[in-house]
């Protein structure tokens, strides 16, 4: 354990940030997974709604520095591409 006051504060803030980041990253992964499953299903409207929610989470995570902006763009692009493919079939 650190003895210096500023180092003690730093440990506390690091732990808070770590917990918050883990929570947000988990929510992000869940949103992407839900969108993925919705796209795999047959309901196009539900898939569009899930894609919008996942896109919002991805953008927010990229803005906050949780994931890289190119990674967010790549994930959004792949989901949109799959949604467009099932929309064209329907």
Image (cartoon, rainbow, N blue to C red):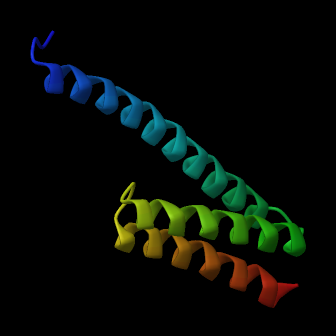
Q: Residue 21 sits in which quadrant?
A: top left
Residue extending farthest to the bottom is 88
The residue located at (38%, 58%) in the rendering is: 67
Percent x, y for residue 9? 25, 25
Percent x, y for residue 46? 86, 66
- Left or right: 74, with 54 as reference point: left
The residue located at (80%, 69%) in the rendering is: 49
The residue located at (47%, 60%) in the rendering is: 61
The residue located at (53%, 45%) in the rendering is: 24
Q: Is residue 19 above or below residue 52?
A: above
Q: Is residue 49 above or below residue 77?
A: above
- Left or right: 62, with 58 as reference point: left
- Left or right: 30, with 26 as reference point: right
- Left or right: 21, with 6 as reference point: right
Percent x, y for residue 74? 44, 74
Q: Is residue 71 above or below residue 90?
A: above
Residue extending farthest to the front is 5
């Amino acid at each position: 354990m650190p003895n210096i006051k500023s180092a003690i504060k730093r440990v506390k803030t690091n732990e808070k940030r770590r917990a918050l980041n883990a929570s947000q990253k988990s929510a992000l992964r869940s949103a992407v997974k839900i969108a993925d499953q919705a796209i795999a299903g047959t309901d196009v409207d539900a898939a569009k709604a899930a894609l919008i929610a996942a896109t919002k989470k991805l953008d927010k995570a990229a803005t906050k520095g949780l994931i890289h902006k190119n990674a967010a763009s790549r994930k959004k692009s792949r989901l949109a591409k799959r949604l467009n493919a099932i929309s064209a079939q329907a």
